[in-house]
Amino acid sequence: MNPHLEVDASENGEPNGLTEVLNGHVAEHTERSRGLVEESSAASIHHVGHKFDDILQLKQGCYVDFPAIKISELMKLNSLGNSSTQSLFSTVNKILDESIERKTGDLSHRVAFLLKNVVQEIERRISAQAENFQNQNNLYKAREQKYQSRLRVLETLTIGTTEENEVVMNQLQQIKIEKSKIEEKKKLEEQDVIRLMKETDQNNIQILALKQELELAKRTYDKHCLQLETQAKETKVELEKLMDLECLLTDSRKKVKELEALSASKSMRWKKKELSYKSFMDSQFESLQGLRLASESIKQDVLKTQRIYLEEFNHLGVKLKGLIDAAENYHMVLAENRKLYNEVQDLKGNIRVYCRIRPFLPGQSRKQTTIEYIGENGELVVVNPSKQGKDSHRLFKFNKVFGPTATQEEVFLDTQPLIRSVLDGYNVCIFAYGQTGSGKTYTMTGPNVSTKEDWGVNYRALNDLFHISQSRKNSIKYEVGVQMVEIYNELVRDLLSSDSSQKSWDLEYCPTKWVSRS
Ligand SMILES: Nc1ncnc2c1ncn2[C@@H]1O[C@H](COP(=O)(O)OP(=O)(O)OP(=O)(O)O)[C@@H](O)[C@H]1O
């Protein structure tokens, strides 16, 4: 397709719709070819057209006077076919206007030839364009038929499509409704999602807080567990105690029952007693009445007795005065008595020697005794079987001789007065003398100190001294000291001293006068 046709049609300013439609179709069908033609020919046409126009411009206003060389040059160039239709028309118009202005009516042969060629070129172009239009018209008609058949097909399709459309529309409507519902649901769900998100956030915060609480609770739980374990142990111990207590409780319940039974029987007894006490009280009340009467008489008697008592009390006062006088003389009498007592002891002798004959020990023969006679006044006759005559019998004289049957108390009774003079300020010494196994310890200490009958002189003497000092405590205060010594191989041993170096003294350096009574 010639691109200039459409350019010319638009340039000529044809305002009808056909031109526009044609131009549209031409443009539609020649879109691809147009680009190629325009690109390939535009440069040469433009160049040649411009050359033609330049030549014409140079001689503007004097076409008539164009020299033959220029006209032949224009013709040679064959630039008419390449020049635009508008420029061709303007050239024709200018040539004709110039010819009219000159009023000569004459045109040169060369100009007329040029004019003719230009007009022929224009005619050729118009006829080509008409032919082109015709072809295009045919083409459009064919296309119109084709489109109309397609239109019919489309109409039938449209009818079918309309029904389908209705169905689809209905479906679409339903879908829209469902969509709106879904959207509402979606909105609600979105709101729910937002709410859930918030709740999730809150829950996360709560979970964190709960985790922390859980951690804390776990720690406290662990601690609590430990505490509970210790408590459980303690409780176990307490439970065991409780079990014991329960046993005790059952026992006590039994006892309570027994006690209840006992208390019931006692209560019965008490009731009986109450009755008996009531009767007793009644009788007592009666007797009380009698007692009141008796008390009245006793009162009278007491008053009488009081009077007698006062009289006797006065009498007693007189007597007591005499007793006080007598008591004042008591110490004097006592001192005199003591003096007399000690004088008696002196008369008996400051140094007294007693002899005690122990019985035979188990296993000893009774036939081998050397004791011939024991006198009442201290005589003792001893037999010596190895000698004859006078020398076979020897008489010994003691203050007193105690035979084998003499008891510990009998031996003590003779020494007791001497011991009591200690309380009057005299020094007294009692000692036992004899060979080994003769009975010194038996006499002085006793065989068995746990029984009072077996006590020897020492225990009995101390007991007597303490007894007397106790009886005289209101008038005299005594201080008692004890010294126990042993003389063995002429050495005196203090038996109460704990110092072993001080335990024995030589007889000359004895610290106390323990051998004589002064
Ligand atoms: N009067 C008595 N009656 C019964 N038995 C006695 C009597 N005197 C001594 N005996 C017994 O004789 C034994 C010897 O007595 P005891 O030990 O008193 O003698 P002793 O002189 O103290 O001896 P020693 O010097 O060796 O200590 C003891 O078994 C004692 O019980």
Image: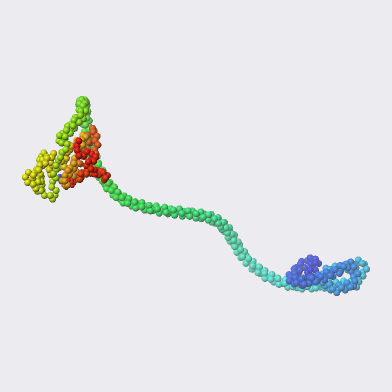
Quadrant housing residue 458: top left
Give x and y (percent) for residue 291.
21, 31
- What's the residue at 77%, 68% (across, down)? 19
- Residue, far bottom: 76
Quadrant housing residue 119: bottom right
* Res 130 visible: no
Quadrant housing residue 298: top left
* Res 76 visible: yes
| Residue 433, placed above or below residue 306 | below
Tell me the colour scheme of the image.
rainbow
Give x and y (percent) for residue 262.
26, 46
Q: Could you say which is closer to the camera, residue 105 or residue 82?
A: 82
Using residue 237 as the reference point, say whether residue 488 is left or right of it.
left
Identify the image quadrant of the N terminus.
bottom right
Give x and y (percent) for residue 160.
64, 68
- Residue, far right: 104
Q: In the rendered picture of this protein, how many numbered marks are placed on residues? A: 0
Q: Could you say which is closer to the camera, residue 120 or residue 114?
A: 114
| Residue 144, placed above or below residue 335 | below
Q: Could you say which is closer to the camera, residue 448 or residue 131?
A: 448
Q: Could you say which is closer to the camera, residue 404 or residue 130?
A: 404
- What's the residue at 20%, 35% (across, down)? 518
- What's the residue at 22%, 41% (across, down)? 508
| Residue 322, placed above or below residue 414 | above
Give x and y (percent) for residue 75.
86, 73
- Residue, far front: 508
